[in-house]
Amino acid sequence: MQPLHRAFRPQWSLRCGPLASVSWLLLRASRVHSSLPTTTCSSPEKQQENEVQKDFSSRLATGPTFQHFLRSVSVPQEKLSSPEAEDPPPYLTVDELLGKQRKVYLETYGCQMNVNDTEIVWSILQKNGFLRTSNLQEADVILLVTCSIREKAEQTIWNRLHQLKALKTKRLCSRVPLRIGILGCMAERLKEEILNREKTVDLLAGPDAYRDLPRLLAVAESGQQAANVLLSLDETYADIMPVQTSPSATSAFVSIMRGCNNMCSYCIVPFTRGRERSRPIASILEEVRKLSEQGLKEVTLLGQNVNSFQDSSEVQFNNRVFTNLSRGFTTNYKTKQGGLRFSHLLDQVSRVDPEMRIRFTSPHPKDFPDEVLQLIHERHNICKQIHLPAQSGSSRVLEAMRRGYSREAYVELIHHIRETIPGVSLSSDFIAGFCGETEKDHLQTVSLLREVQYNMGFLFAYSMRQKTRAYHRLKDDVPEEVKLRRLEELITVFREEATKTNKTSVGSTQLVLVEGISKRSPADLCGRNDGNLKVIFPDVEMKDVTNPGFRVRAQPGDYVLVKITSASSQTLKGHVLCKTTLKGSSAYC
Ligand code: 5AD
Ligand code: SF4
């Protein structure tokens, strides 16, 4: 993930500070009566609801129109920032903005960022009087948090909408009508095209519009479609503490920045998630402290471009501090100056709790200056694990992808990282069959996989996305079957190399953070080692070096030492030696 191209200006969807109170609502008054079963259902609750809807519609008719919102964009800024401008729209009462105990079912697709966004969404809805359900059948509102990165991800959502349509049609009229919302990247990418194509959808909210959900749901409640797909220059949801979905979890994700400025030529992310912006360090530290107090043992710092972090929220910081890039790497955008950078954040976060492991994802290889690498090496609770998305092993293809580095610069960075952080685990993303990729280019990717010997890999067939530079300037000329064949080859080579690499740890002792019972066997436990690889071991009694003389069984959240006895491309197996601590683990090996 990377910097934003200068020409990037999403049409009518960019929001910045002074215009923050101006939002776009898409209202379809025609549906008010047609979609509501007013004649067939006559329960008192229904009649009351219809009255409310009629009242709502008449107030809506006299309220501001879509044009009004467009016009208000040109209102002078002083007026916009006046208190009156921030009052809620007069046609929605405070009561209508509350959830009335409606039950919300949230379904998440795509990346870890979406998992975190789901927690933010739930935090907002919970505060506004909604209830959560994990039972689809009892839901009053179904919200899909969507992904657009590849065509297949979107197809999954269209298929899901077909299933949900049946649920909506079959809904008993004695219940409140079911409302369905599309949130996240797909809402942002397709905007009203979704509403036109799939009438079953009641609301859309882009990744920067989640605060507006209570209002959008209030509009949808009246049987109208509602949308807010404004992108923001400053929304980081810094003040919203995500609600952890699984209370027993040992680890949590903490969002530290949003958006991407890189404009890799194949990638839709800068268009769906907008410009890069970082969350103030103080609020990140507050969240990490809270998680530590709750007993969580691992935090993963999250962002599209996590190591480009730059907190400029506190003006006193020297703005003459230059960005240090990895050697041989460039950006597609003017590099930023000043502010607090990723190394500072990592340092601060890792000081919160010496028993808390720190990871981060997803970084860009360009942002690994020596100070970051040195800190990872020195700090005992920062995991020695780095994701370095290469995307291709061919300099020619990397150039077409606008990644800002050559194969040689990437390989040099790998050597430098391995020298600085001995034993580091490396993972990567690769795309097979990008525009113009020849067989020779593909073989160079194969050879990079062999040369680097990653511990983990995420491999994808190229999927052309509208709006991207590749869509406008390049030809998607690798036939589908060739893409898939190349992808298969990459997967095979990656597995062979990862198996070889992982087998070198057989006989070693690894520190494992216990997650719980293994899915494969109730007699086994599973957890993750420092390199984030899954480790499985029998659930037996062991000595507890933190409590001499006692024997215990491992619990989720415990650190244990495991002697590795076998390895595959994705998993290590072994037997447990003892319970220990993160800080003291090396002393007990
Ligand atoms: N087609 C295939 N894979 C893609 N990725 C991003 N955009 C595309 C695309 N259009 C992959 C990249 C990125 C990961 C998150 O998804 O490898 O690192
Ligand atoms: Fe940004 Fe996409 Fe490139 Fe990642 S792949 S750096 S999200 S443009």
Image (cartoon, rainbow, N blue to C red):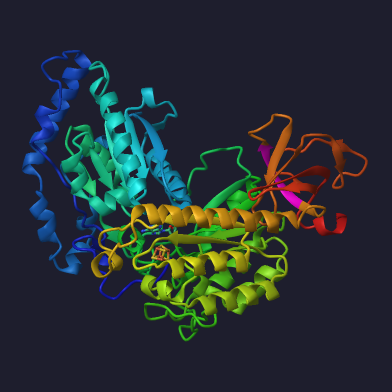
Task: Let me know if residue 242 is in the magenta part.
Answer: no
**Looking at the image, which residue is at 57% across and 57% down?**
493
**Looking at the image, which residue is at 51% across and 39% down?**
245
Name the residue nearer the viewer: 529 or 89.
529
Horizontally, is 510 left or right of 588 in the view? left
Residue 511 in the image, given as x and y percentages of width and height = 76, 52
Residue 189 in the image, given as x and y percentages of width and height = 27, 54
Task: Let me know if residue 515 is in the magenta part.
Answer: yes
Horizontally, is 277 left or right of 287 in the view? left
For ligand 1, which image quadrant applies? Answer: bottom left
**Looking at the image, which residue is at 29% across and 39% down?**
158
> Which corner quadrant of the image does residue 199 belong to?
top left
Horizontally, is 79 left or right of 300 in the view? left
Res 315 seen here: yes
**Looking at the image, which residue is at 27% across and 19% down?**
175
The magenta segment: 511-516
Name the residue nearer the viewer: 584 or 473.
473
* Relative height, residue 168 to residue 465 (above, below): above
Number of marks present in the image shown: 0
* Relative height, residue 454 to residue 162 (above, below): below
Horizontally, is 227 left or right of 355 in the view? left
